[in-house]
Image (cartoon, grey):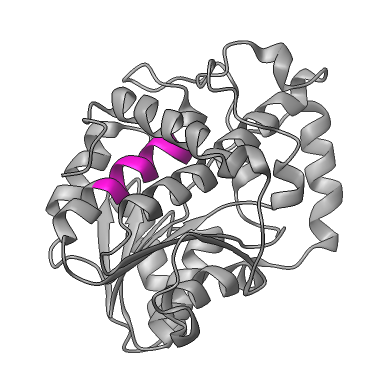
Amino acid sequence: MRAVVTGATGGIGEAIARRLAAAGHSVVLIGRSSERTDAARRRIAAAVPGADLHGETADLSLMADVRDLATRLDPLPDVAISNAAVVAPLDRVTAEGLPLTLATNHLAPYLLLRTLAERIGAGPARFVIVGAAPRALARVPVDLDDLRMRNERTLGPLPSFRPFAAYGRTKNMNAMFGYALARRLAGTRITVNGGHPGIVRQTGLGRHASGGLKVFTSLLNPFVPGVDYGADNPAWLATAPEVAGVTGGYFVRRKEVPTAPHTTDVTRCDRLWDESARLVGLPAALR
């Protein structure tokens, strides 16, 4: 099996890649620089002698990079795990004019997995979208009239916590996208599932945190498990025989769970799909 893992140069992504490599799978590590990708490959190779590892460089905040990555991957993967994510200041925008959090966390997996699905066609594959805690996300529904999250006050009263609320919205977008893609791929041999890795430390998500959020993150870290715990659910979804053929689900600790009604509403999911297509320059319909 050949697996592609985004955000594989540290945190949960590297732990997922290491776990898959230890199980004998070929793993493609996606990182935003060749230096980081090579360093992660060396760390995994030291932990898993003989691991079949490959590196690909792409800045997943840039749709041009994502598009190029999705079209150059060869051979095509049997598994694609979308894991890369950031919690960035709300005023951080990419060179393409998109909010960094929106581009990296939602538009990148939307473009990558859509393009891979079209290339894979009739072939079998598993897509896994790493999300967040469904109960927490129930409180931050996506504002479909403000995907760029320009109205910052709707993200909460504390400015230092607003970037994390924006992150939460993009994680809800991940769930909505997963459901929408699974519906569009019904009848094919490609499955799409989302999953929460758990709250873990050393993910790198909080590296841009400031104020109260930075303090909260530092206080939380000693009391939560590490990245190997977070790798379990995504790696299981990617490989377990018991979920072969299962699609359109969301899993926590290897069990399928419901997510908030605002993430499963078909009309809302389709509206997010269409607007995301516009933002990345794709037609709404899959080929």
Residue 224 visible in the picture: yes
The residue nearer to you, when weighing 261 against 225, is: 261
Residue drawn where x is 42% and y is 80% of the image = 239
The quarter of the displayed image where residue 60 is located? top left
Residue 67, percent across and down? 21, 40
Compare residues 44 and 147 and report the one nearer the observer: 147
Picture quadrant where residue 271 is located? top left
Q: Is residue 243 above or below residue 62?
A: below
Where residue 63 sits in the image (x, y, percent)?
28, 33
- In the rendered image, the vertical position of residue 120 relative to residue 71, given as above or below: below
| Magenta-drawn stretch, dominant element (helix, strand or loop) | helix
Q: How many numbered dots are placed on residues in this image?
A: 0
Tell me what residue is drawn at x 67 percent, y 14 percent: 152
Q: Is residue 108 magenta?
A: yes
264 horizontally vs 136: left or right: left
Taking the spot 27% from the left edge, 69% from the top edge, the residue there is 189
User: In the picture shown, does residue 60 fall above or below 142?
Assistant: below
Question: Camera-side residue: 138 or 239?
Answer: 138
Residue 107: image quadrant is top left
Q: Which residues are magenta?
A: 104-114
Quadrant into which the C terminus falls: top left
Considering only vertical position in the picture, is 136 above or below 223? above
Left or right, 150 with reference to 280:
right
Residue 46 percent coordinates (x, y): 42, 81
Q: Is residue 59 visible?
A: no
Name the residue: 82% across, 20% down. 158
Viewer-nearest residue: 6 or 217: 6
Residue 240 colored in magenta in the image = no
Q: In which quadrant will I find the N terminus?
A: bottom left
